[in-house]
Image (cartoon, rainbow, N blue to C red):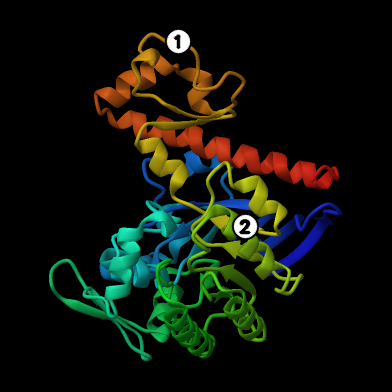
Amino acid sequence: MQFSITHKSEKSLARVGVLETPHGKIETPCFVAVGTKATVKALGPDDLERVGTQIVLANTYHLYTSKTHEVIKQAGGLNNFMRWQGITMTDSGGFQVFSLGFGKDHEIGRYSTLFPGEDLQKMVKAESIKESQYIKILDEGVVFRLPDGKRTVLTPEKSIEIQEAIGADIMFSFDECTSPLASKEYVKEAMGRTHRWAERCIKAKTRNDQALWGIVQGGEWNDLREESVRTISNLPFDGFGLGGAMGKTKERMFELIEFINTRLPDNKPRHLLGIGYPEDIPEIVKLGVDTFDCVAPTREARNGTLYVKGGRISIQKSEYRQDFLPIEEGCGCYTCQNFNRAYLRHLYKEKELLFYRLASIHNLYFINNLVAGIRERIKNGEI
């Protein structure tokens, strides 16, 4: 993998770069579409190409527990398996350490309750939970309890083995993603574990055609983030991920992103894990993020929420019953060029499967078009 910066802003930390992998090259900043189980829900690879998608991210944990990673290896890798010709990423399974562990214990999730600082009940509950009832975190790795009652163990070495079987262009090191309600004492302990696991991931890696990116942890504390940046950036990673809880408010999230990116090496790509709502994208790009993934565009699409320049519309509202305009006038996506709000509302209310495809096409096109516009503004010195 090679990464080169072609334009740097004089007004912010924003930059435009070119990321080259065995499956081609892309321009950053770039939104990464989430294809958890080797598919972006409701969309085919031809849809992804038409909406301007450059990278797809698959989920290591879910492909492992379904044993699909073995089939993917036999198929010749993720690109052959899902018939996607662009760049691919796999996460490490570290997010599931949180979402299937303390996330369930604390009744929070990165996407459903990103900033739970105002929820005192959950804060109190978090204080009383010292160990997760769903998983067991050890220095060796993490023991997961599967839905069928069986247990499985994910270690740094196993995570790399699975990701190499999947064969994505970019892998992430196995980390412990901590709860946004975790104490500083626990986050420090988990961060140390993540650093040790990072070294084990590097040793376990055997393929030269896959890049390995390390993940910076440390929660909402500057001193921990600084220590993690120093440790992870001193290891021979090809790029970096900004992981874990980013504070309890959006303002704090932006402060932490800037704090981390001003300390990471300038010549390697930076990926923001799990964050990418439309309203956040201009700011995170200004703060030096190169790639970022988020389930929001497709998840919100399936739930009837469609992106427009002024924000969002909820297509289920009765006001769209006889609205024969496209989702957004002037939008170049397939959906807006061929269908109107009234038809989309009809599909949604009738639970027709076509709605999920048309809505997802629009939201992903909107995000990719937004990011493409930002790239051009960086090149023109406007950002």
Badge 2 local density, few (<14 within 10 Å), some, or many (20+)?
some
Residue 55, can we see it?
no
Q: Which numbered disc flags the more N-terminal residue, 1 or 2?
A: 2
Residue 355: percent from the left, percent from the top? Answer: 35, 29
Judged left or right of residue 109, residue 310 is: right
Nearer the observer, 145 or 69? 145
Residue beneath the point at 42% across and 81% down: 186
Q: Quadrant of the N terminus?
A: bottom right
Relative to 34, is 241 above or below?
below
Judging by the rendered image, the residue that carries numbered circle 2 is 254
Q: Amino acid at mark 2?
A: Phe
Judged left or right of residue 93, residue 234 is: right
Q: Amino acid at mark 1?
A: Phe
Residue 132: quarter of image: bottom left
Do labels 1 and 2 touch, CB within 8 Å? no
What label does residue 324 carry, if any?
1
Residue beneath the point at 57% across and 69% down: 241
Residue 162: quarter of image: bottom left
Residue 369: percent from the left, percent from the top? Answer: 63, 37
Mark nearer the viewer, 1 or 2:
2
Residue 315: quarter of image: top left
Q: Secondary structure at mark 1?
A: loop
Residue 11: percent from the left, percent from the top? Answer: 83, 52
Q: Secondary structure at mark 2?
A: helix
Residue 169: percent from the left, percent from the top? Answer: 55, 66
Residue beneath the point at 40% across and 78% down: 159
